[in-house]
Image: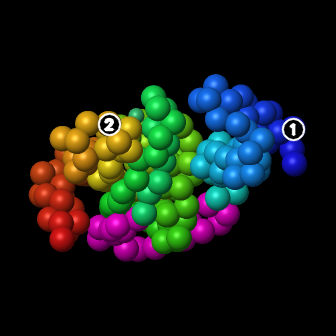
Protein backbone atom coordinates (compact mmCIF):
# COMPACT_ATOMS: atom_id res chain seq x y z
CA UNK A 1 0.00 0.00 0.00
CA UNK A 2 1.37 3.44 -0.87
CA UNK A 3 1.78 6.20 1.73
CA UNK A 4 -0.99 8.16 0.03
CA UNK A 5 -3.40 5.23 0.21
CA UNK A 6 -2.54 4.76 3.86
CA UNK A 7 -3.09 8.46 4.63
CA UNK A 8 -6.47 8.46 2.93
CA UNK A 9 -7.43 5.22 4.70
CA UNK A 10 -6.46 6.69 8.10
CA UNK A 11 -8.71 9.65 7.39
CA UNK A 12 -11.60 7.42 6.36
CA UNK A 13 -11.20 5.50 9.62
CA UNK A 14 -11.62 8.78 11.51
CA UNK A 15 -14.63 9.74 9.45
CA UNK A 16 -16.26 6.38 10.19
CA UNK A 17 -15.60 6.89 13.88
CA UNK A 18 -16.97 10.45 13.77
CA UNK A 19 -20.16 9.06 12.28
CA UNK A 20 -20.60 7.04 15.47
CA UNK A 21 -19.62 3.72 13.95
CA UNK A 22 -17.04 1.27 15.16
CA UNK A 23 -14.31 1.06 12.51
CA UNK A 24 -13.06 -2.16 14.08
CA UNK A 25 -16.21 -4.19 13.68
CA UNK A 26 -16.10 -7.07 11.21
CA UNK A 27 -17.85 -5.41 8.25
CA UNK A 28 -15.90 -2.19 8.49
CA UNK A 29 -12.41 -3.39 9.27
CA UNK A 30 -11.15 -3.19 5.66
CA UNK A 31 -13.45 -0.38 4.61
CA UNK A 32 -11.00 2.52 5.06
CA UNK A 33 -8.47 0.89 2.75
CA UNK A 34 -11.11 -0.13 0.20
CA UNK A 35 -12.63 3.34 0.25
CA UNK A 36 -9.20 4.94 -0.13
CA UNK A 37 -8.38 2.79 -3.15
CA UNK A 38 -11.78 3.50 -4.68
CA UNK A 39 -11.36 7.24 -4.21
CA UNK A 40 -7.93 7.09 -5.78
CA UNK A 41 -9.35 5.21 -8.76
CA UNK A 42 -12.12 7.80 -9.13
CA UNK A 43 -9.52 10.56 -9.25
CA UNK A 44 -7.03 8.71 -11.44
CA UNK A 45 -7.30 11.49 -14.03
CA UNK A 46 -4.85 13.64 -12.07
CA UNK A 47 -2.10 11.08 -12.78
CA UNK A 48 -2.70 10.92 -16.52
CA UNK A 49 -0.90 12.94 -19.07
CA UNK A 50 -2.21 13.93 -22.46
CA UNK A 51 0.80 12.96 -24.58
CA UNK A 52 0.87 9.43 -23.16
CA UNK A 53 -2.87 9.17 -23.58
CA UNK A 54 -2.85 10.22 -27.25
CA UNK A 55 0.22 8.07 -27.90
CA UNK A 56 0.39 8.63 -31.64
CA UNK A 57 -3.30 7.92 -32.30
CA UNK A 58 -3.65 11.12 -34.28
CA UNK A 59 -3.95 10.30 -37.98
CA UNK A 60 -3.75 12.43 -41.10
CA UNK A 61 -7.01 12.41 -42.99
CA UNK A 62 -8.73 14.23 -45.83
CA UNK A 63 -12.02 13.66 -44.08
CA UNK A 64 -13.78 16.93 -43.39
CA UNK A 65 -17.26 15.72 -42.41
CA UNK A 66 -18.46 15.90 -38.85
CA UNK A 67 -17.35 12.99 -36.64
CA UNK A 68 -19.77 12.17 -33.84
CA UNK A 69 -19.22 9.93 -30.85
CA UNK A 70 -22.45 9.44 -28.94
CA UNK A 71 -23.29 8.06 -25.51
CA UNK A 72 -19.83 7.91 -23.99
CA UNK A 73 -20.38 6.72 -20.42
CA UNK A 74 -19.22 9.22 -17.88
CA UNK A 75 -18.63 8.96 -14.12
CA UNK A 76 -17.26 11.85 -12.15
CA UNK A 77 -17.21 13.29 -8.63
CA UNK A 78 -18.82 16.61 -7.79
CA UNK A 79 -16.28 18.78 -6.07
CA UNK A 80 -18.83 20.33 -3.73
CA UNK A 81 -20.01 17.11 -2.07
CA UNK A 82 -17.56 14.44 -3.26
CA UNK A 83 -20.55 12.52 -4.55
CA UNK A 84 -20.81 10.97 -8.00
CA UNK A 85 -22.44 12.51 -10.99
CA UNK A 86 -22.86 10.25 -13.99
CA UNK A 87 -24.40 10.15 -17.41
CA UNK A 88 -23.57 10.42 -21.08
CA UNK A 89 -21.22 12.56 -23.07
CA UNK A 90 -21.71 13.31 -26.77
CA UNK A 91 -18.83 14.68 -28.77
CA UNK A 92 -18.47 15.95 -32.31
CA UNK A 93 -15.70 17.55 -34.25
CA UNK A 94 -15.07 18.66 -37.80
CA UNK A 95 -11.55 17.52 -38.72
CA UNK A 96 -9.03 19.82 -40.28
CA UNK A 97 -6.51 17.30 -41.64
CA UNK A 98 -6.28 15.13 -38.53
CA UNK A 99 -8.52 12.58 -36.87
CA UNK A 100 -8.15 11.08 -33.42
CA UNK A 101 -8.62 7.36 -32.73
CA UNK A 102 -12.09 6.63 -31.41
CA UNK A 103 -10.98 4.98 -28.17
CA UNK A 104 -8.82 8.00 -27.40
CA UNK A 105 -11.86 10.24 -27.38
CA UNK A 106 -13.39 8.09 -24.67
CA UNK A 107 -10.07 8.09 -22.79
CA UNK A 108 -10.01 11.87 -22.94
CA UNK A 109 -13.47 11.99 -21.33
CA UNK A 110 -12.18 9.66 -18.63
CA UNK A 111 -9.06 11.68 -17.98
CA UNK A 112 -11.09 14.78 -17.11
CA UNK A 113 -14.01 12.93 -15.45
CA UNK A 114 -11.82 11.15 -12.96
CA UNK A 115 -11.12 14.28 -10.97
CA UNK A 116 -13.06 16.47 -8.58
CA UNK A 117 -15.27 18.34 -11.00
CA UNK A 118 -18.23 20.48 -11.75
CA UNK A 119 -20.12 19.49 -14.87
CA UNK A 120 -19.70 22.86 -16.59
CA UNK A 121 -15.91 22.83 -16.28
CA UNK A 122 -15.69 19.18 -17.28
CA UNK A 123 -17.61 19.95 -20.49
CA UNK A 124 -15.34 22.87 -21.28
CA UNK A 125 -12.11 21.00 -20.55
CA UNK A 126 -13.02 18.09 -22.83
CA UNK A 127 -13.97 20.46 -25.67
CA UNK A 128 -10.90 22.67 -25.40
CA UNK A 129 -8.54 19.73 -25.11
CA UNK A 130 -10.00 17.98 -28.15
CA UNK A 131 -9.74 21.21 -30.15
CA UNK A 132 -6.14 21.66 -29.11
CA UNK A 133 -5.15 18.08 -29.89
CA UNK A 134 -6.88 17.74 -33.27
CA UNK A 135 -6.77 21.40 -34.38
CA UNK A 136 -10.27 20.71 -35.67
CA UNK A 137 -12.46 23.30 -37.41
CA UNK A 138 -14.91 22.92 -34.58
CA UNK A 139 -15.68 20.86 -31.50
CA UNK A 140 -18.97 20.28 -29.69
CA UNK A 141 -19.48 18.56 -26.36
CA UNK A 142 -22.78 17.87 -24.62
CA UNK A 143 -22.99 16.18 -21.23
CA UNK A 144 -26.22 14.94 -19.68
CA UNK A 145 -25.73 13.84 -16.09
CA UNK A 146 -27.50 13.05 -12.86
CA UNK A 147 -26.00 14.22 -9.62
CA UNK A 148 -26.29 12.08 -6.50
CA UNK A 149 -25.90 15.19 -4.36
CA UNK A 150 -29.22 16.35 -5.82
CA UNK A 151 -30.90 12.96 -6.09
CA UNK A 152 -30.20 11.86 -2.51
CA UNK A 153 -31.53 15.08 -1.01
CA UNK A 154 -35.15 16.11 -1.55
CA UNK A 155 -37.66 13.92 -3.33
CA UNK A 156 -38.59 16.45 -5.98
CA UNK A 157 -35.14 16.38 -7.47
CA UNK A 158 -34.77 12.65 -7.93
CA UNK A 159 -35.28 12.56 -11.65
CA UNK A 160 -33.67 15.81 -12.62
CA UNK A 161 -30.63 15.73 -14.79
CA UNK A 162 -28.39 18.52 -15.93
CA UNK A 163 -27.31 19.22 -19.48
CA UNK A 164 -24.25 21.29 -20.29
CA UNK A 165 -22.73 22.07 -23.65
CA UNK A 166 -19.68 23.69 -25.11
CA UNK A 167 -19.51 24.72 -28.76
CA UNK A 168 -16.23 25.82 -30.30
CA UNK A 169 -15.24 26.97 -33.78
CA UNK A 170 -17.72 25.95 -36.49
CA UNK A 171 -20.23 24.73 -33.93
CA UNK A 172 -20.29 28.15 -32.33
CA UNK A 173 -20.23 30.21 -35.54
CA UNK A 174 -22.44 28.12 -37.80
CA UNK A 175 -26.03 27.53 -36.70
CA UNK A 176 -26.52 24.79 -39.30
CA UNK A 177 -23.53 22.72 -38.09
CA UNK A 178 -24.69 23.13 -34.52
CA UNK A 179 -28.26 22.11 -35.22
CA UNK A 180 -27.09 19.12 -37.32
CA UNK A 181 -25.12 17.92 -34.32
CA UNK A 182 -27.94 18.49 -31.85
CA UNK A 183 -30.37 16.62 -34.13
CA UNK A 184 -27.96 13.71 -34.56
CA UNK A 185 -27.44 13.17 -30.85
CA UNK A 186 -31.16 13.05 -30.08
CA UNK A 187 -32.57 9.58 -29.74
ZN1 LIG B 1 -22.66 18.26 -5.51
What residue is shown at x 26% (from left), y 36% (from top)?
A: 154
Residue 64, given in percent of the width and then of the height, sits at 33, 69
Label 2 sits on residue: 153
Q: Badge 1 local density, few (<14 within 10 Å), some, or many (20+)?
A: few
Residue 91, given in percent of the width and then of the height, sits at 35, 60
Residue 79, which numbered label? Answer: none
Front-most of residues 90 and 130? 90
Q: Is residue 120 left or right of residue 182?
A: right
Instruction: State the CA–CA distance, disc 1 to disc 2.
Output: 35 Å
Front-most of residues 72 and 103? 72
Can residue 129 be seen in the rendering of this structure? no
Q: Secondary structure at mark 2?
A: loop
Indicate the quadrant of ligand 1 in the picture. top left
Residue 76, given in percent of the width and then of the height, sits at 48, 48
Whether label 1 lies within 8 Å of ligand 1 gets the answer no
What residue is shown at x 73% (from left), y 39% (from top)?
A: 23
Whether label 2 lies within 8 Å of ligand 1 gets the answer no
Give residue 21's quadrant in the image.
Answer: top right
Residue 3, which numbered label? Answer: 1
Residue 65: within the magenta?
Answer: yes
Above/below status of 126 relative to 90: above
Q: Badge 2 local density, few (<14 within 10 Å), some, or many (20+)?
A: few
Q: Is residue 6 left or right of residue 115?
A: right
Above/below status of 40 relative to 90: above
Which segment did they paint magenta? Answer: 54-72
What residue is shown at x 62% (from left), y 60% (from top)?
A: 54
Front-most of residues 60 and 149? 149
Above/below status of 137 relative to 2: below
Report the quarter where the C terminus lies.
Answer: bottom left
Camera-side mark, 1 or 2:
2
Q: Secondary structure at mark 1?
A: helix
Amino acid sequence: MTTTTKNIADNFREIIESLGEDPNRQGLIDTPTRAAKALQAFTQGYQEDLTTLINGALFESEMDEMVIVKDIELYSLCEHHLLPFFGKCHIAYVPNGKVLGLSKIARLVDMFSKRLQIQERLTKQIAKCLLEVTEAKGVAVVIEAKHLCMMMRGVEKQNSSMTTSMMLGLFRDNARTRSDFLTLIQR
